[in-house]
Image (cartoon, rainbow, N blue to C red):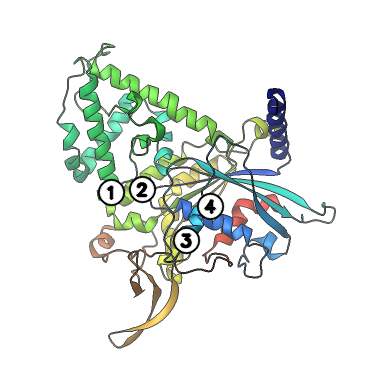
Amino acid sequence: MTTLEHWLGLASSHAADLLDRALDRQLRLAVTGLAHSGKTAFIASLVNQLEHACSRDAKLPLWRAHDRGRILGVRRVPQLNAHIPSFAYEAACERLFGEPPVWPESTRGVSEIRLEIRYRPAGRWARDVATLYLDIVDYPGEWLLDLPLLRLDYAAWSAQVAATLRRDPRAAELAASWMHWNPSPQDPFGEKAVAEVAAAYTAWLRACREQLNMSLLQPGRFLLPGEYAGAPMLQFLPWVWAAPAGKADERSVYAQLEHRFEQYKQHLVKGFYKEHFAGFDRQIVLVDCLHALDGGPECFHDTGRALRQIIQSFSYGKGNLLERLFRPRIDRVLFAASKADHLLPEQHDNLLSLLQDLVKGSAAVAHFEGVSSDCMALASVAATEVARGKAGGELLRGLRGHSIDGQALLIHPQDVPGRLPSQDWWSTRGEGYDRFCPQAMERSRPMPHIRMDAALEFLLGDKLR
């Protein structure tokens, strides 16, 4: 193929992409969430449910197009963005359908997968067959947390971190490894000293995530730097000591840290935002409320703060034709409490109410901008089943499954608060919620789930009419 033919092919593909978007034949779905929310398992299950949509084993009654027999077939097709890694669907399935089954590896970079959905439109005068191209984009939750930095300057971000240290003594204790530095704002900049203390700050972020279950940890790329590991742009930290009196000298340590913060925003955060977020049509935000509750009150409130900052960073609202072609904007957002299978069915309503309370400020932002938003409790891959067993001579109803280390379990999980927990709830709560590995599944059948069909209806339903 000649160079001219190559560029003509790219131009043709881009033109077709624009036409599909203009005619509502293409949808870009962003899957986001904080750590432990199950983004990779969700995407694997979503693709799996769609690929089995026309099989007799499909269980998708809440997805109207499927329930009314209008889905004709779904298949994976090559993605348009060849420079972006493909979502590792087969690798995820190998783990989920393995012997023993295990959860897929966590997201470590941006990836996407494209599906072609053939369906019969509703309506008397509709065409016999129509096609919707669905692009599903996955990206690390750690990178998602960088978006709020675009609204902050270095001083404001530093003040935000300082407030966290004042609010949480546990985080402040772990910060001793870098807080001891205590420089003067006008001290001369030293490359080696800054690299060392920035490494200590990064270790602190990791400790806050792993030991304290915190979510609002910035900059996110420090935790998953990718190809930028070791770059000076990732060697800075917040200024939590005495602020400079007036403008700091440009060669001072304060001025250089401020400069690196701005370079980080300009080259990493803004670049990532423009390349990916500006092109999303729909958004699902996965939240592991059970993990947040297990982390204690400060972890739970930190999750709420992280969600509010994240949602305010997205561009919501319906656009006209030109905006849809060149500046697509999110017009539907779904907040989903994952791992509903870790609770008895009668507790799902409480889990939903808790999520609604947790994100009510964020959902209000979306509603104000004219965006359709909803909340639901779901399990992308159900790891348990409701069963009965004896304990102390009494027949009890509970959940049957296997623990992460493979031990058979039959447990009665503790209840979930139906609203933001009170101090009394925190003081009397139990030991926490059990974690389960996937149940054994047949590869020829769709993965068991809870309400994935409801998620499909909300995210795709209006495009398949």
Give the labeled residue for mark 3. Answer: 96
Q: Return the residue found at the far front.
A: 1
Query: In the image, residue 14 lies at what x, y percent?
Result: 68, 32
Q: Earlier in the sequence, mark 4 or mark 2?
A: 4
Q: Nearer the viewer, residue 251 or 427?
A: 251
Q: Looking at the picture, does residue 346 appear above or below residue 284?
A: below
- Give left or right: position of 173 versus 375: left
Q: Is residue 185 visible?
A: yes
Q: Give the number of the mark in front: 3 or 1.
A: 3
Give the labeled residue for mark 1. Answer: 210
Name the image quarter holding residue 195.
top left
Q: Secondary structure at mark 3?
A: helix
Q: Is residue 376 visible?
A: no
The residues bearing labels 1 and 4 have C-alpha atoms spaced at a distance of 27 Å
Q: Which mark is residue 89?
A: 4
Query: In the image, residue 321 lies at what x, y percent?
Result: 70, 34
The residues bearing labels 2 and 3 have C-alpha atoms spaced at a distance of 28 Å
Residue count near mark 4 (Cα–Cα under 10 Å), binned few <14, some 14–19, many ≥20: some
> Mark 3 belongs to which amino acid?
Leu
Q: Give the number of the mark in front: 2 or 3.
A: 3
Give the labeled residue for mark 2. Answer: 303
Residue count near mark 2 (Cα–Cα under 10 Å), binned few <14, some 14–19, many ≥20: many
The residues bearing labels 3 and 1 have C-alpha atoms spaced at a distance of 24 Å
Q: Which mark is residue 430?
A: none
> Mark 4 belongs to which amino acid?
Tyr
The residues bearing labels 4 and 2 have C-alpha atoms spaced at a distance of 28 Å
